[in-house]
Image (cartoon, grey):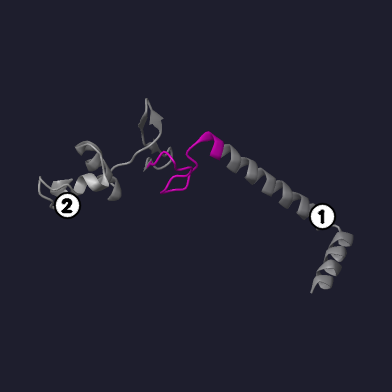
Amino acid sequence: MKEVFGWTQASRMASVYVHLSGKNTDNAILKVYGKVIEETVKGGVLMPIQCLRCKTGNESTNKFCKLCGLPLDEVTQRNLLTEEFRHKEANRLMDSLLKDDKVVKLLMSKLKQTQ
């Protein structure tokens, strides 16, 4: 780290900010520049999550791929599918209601009252 920032070997500047080994420092710097990815815990070590669609490496904390937006874990996928199903059901119900002229007239009168 001292080499990277141009500090002398005798400088105590690095110890003020971090207490990491050289490998950790290198990884932290590479991560800032988007070169190293951390993620999912495997034996206490964070491992990257690879997107099944685009093969992009993602941080373990990501719920969606940072490139293509695909959900990265089963819980997020399940929640997304459940929400999508609810929206489709609501749209189907609304479509069937709007086929009834009485419902349309009632909605129109309610809309006029709110304006």
- Which residue is tagged 1? 97
Please name the residue shown 37% across and 25% down the image. 43
Q: Is residue 79 above or below residue 33?
A: above
Which residue is at the front of the view, 77 or 44? 44
Question: In the figure, residue 28 lies in which quadrant?
Answer: top left
Q: Position of residue 33 (x, y in %)?
A: 27, 50
Question: In the figure, residue 97 lies in which quadrant?
Answer: bottom right
Which residue is at the front of the view, 67 or 54? 67
Which residue is at the front of the view, 44 or 42? 44
- Which residue is tagged 2? 5
Q: Element at badge 1? A: helix
Q: Is residue 91 above or below residue 63?
A: below
Main SS, magenta residues = loop
Q: Element at badge 2? A: helix
Please name the residue shown 22% across and 36% down the image. 21
What's drawn in magenta, residue-wise? 58-76
Question: In the figure, residue 78 lies in which quadrant?
Answer: top right
